[in-house]
Image: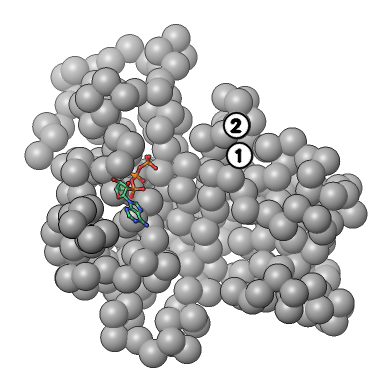
Amino acid sequence: MKAISVQHVHKRYGELHVLRGLTLEISKGECVILLGANGCGKSTLMRCLNGLAPHDQGDITIFGQPLNHLSKAKLRQLRRKVGVVFQQFNLVQNVSVFQNVLYGAMGQQRFGLLSSLACFASNDLRERAMASLERVGLAHKAHADCRELSGGQQQRVAIARTLMQDAEIIIADEPVASLDPKAGKEIMDLLLDVVAERQLTVLCTLHQLELAQQYGDRIVGMKAGQIVLDSPRTDVALATMQQLYQGDVRVDQTSAPATDTTAIPSIR
Ligand SMILES: Nc1ncnc2c1ncn2[C@@H]1O[C@H](COP(=O)(O)OP(=O)(O)OP(=O)(O)O)[C@@H](O)[C@H]1O
């Protein structure tokens, strides 16, 4: 059974036809890097996968469970299996690092309710929250206010929060886009180490092609709401990735290896 199966999916926002018959399968434990120019539909696909945006046509299954035939309660349960890491970290700013991590175990609650729940968190949950913070190297910042942290540290907190969710799939939407190259690489190293330890399945968008050349099992490329490239990472040359962007390429050419045009699988 596939962890994620997307079959002929369409998604429209009014007149705008964003996903156009998109098909993609991801096995358990696989790490897929999703590339594509601004506006091609990457975030929309991710929102469909975690049930935030219902798709209009086609089928999406998560570990065999179809998203479009689930009751609200079942959908909530399924969404617990899908952890999301965003570019903007999405931390609650006026509470401690520790509380932010604790919230990861408490599902999609309203903030007021979260604050009360945090007061009654069991010792077990508190220990798990501290262990998650240790795993991301931030136990010493547990009682700091999130606003005191650097971007890289905030993303570590967001990863620790996702670990608390016990998710089986991680959807990471440009997790390093707002970080400098060093912090970005550190976060990618951490994220991929953590998912490998727990055999999680990952779908991660990146715009930095020099990172896409280093991380993940498979490169999937999107153009205009469809998959146009799907190959093992080691088979995909930089030039092929660049074709996806039509000039909108954010790549550090100085650190990218020379393009090997002999290994280009053609874009569909
Ligand atoms: N909630 C929404 N309502 C209406 N249109 C939307 C909505 N969300 C996205 N869109 C539009 O859908 C298209 C695809 O957007 P999406 O965010 O999925 O692209 P993307 O590939 O993730 O882009 P980026 O790389 O810039 O994040 C864009 O034209 C966008 O303006």
- C-alpha separation, residue under disc 1 versus residue under disc 2: 9 Å
* Residue type marked 2: Leu
Residue at the far top in the pictured view: 254
- Image point (38%, 57%), residue name: 46
| For residue 220, side relative to residue 49 (left or right) | left
Q: As drawn, is 249 to the left or to the right of 222? A: right
Task: Bin the neighbour count of mark 1 within 10 Å (Cα to Cα): few under 14, some 14-19, many 20 and up.
Answer: many
Q: In which quarter of the image is residue 260?
A: top left
> How far across and how far down the image is residue 16, in percent?
21, 53
Secondary structure at badge 1 equals helix
Q: Is residue 76 something one can see in this rendering?
A: yes
Give the residue displayed 73% in from the left and 78% down from the top.
113
- Looking at the rendered structure, the secondary structure element under dot 2 is loop
Q: Write down the residue under mark 1.
A: 187
Q: In which quarter of the image is residue 24?
A: bottom left
Residue at 68% from the left image edge and 37% from the top image edge: 151
Work out whether residue 82 or residue 15 is closer to the camera in this orientation and state it: 15
Q: Earlier in the sequence, mark 1 or mark 2?
A: 2
Say what amino acid the circle numbered 1 marks. Ile
Label 2, on which residue?
179
Tell me if residue 142 comes above or below residue 124 in the rendering.
Answer: above
| Within-10-Å neighbours for mark 2: few <14, some 14–19, many 20+ | some
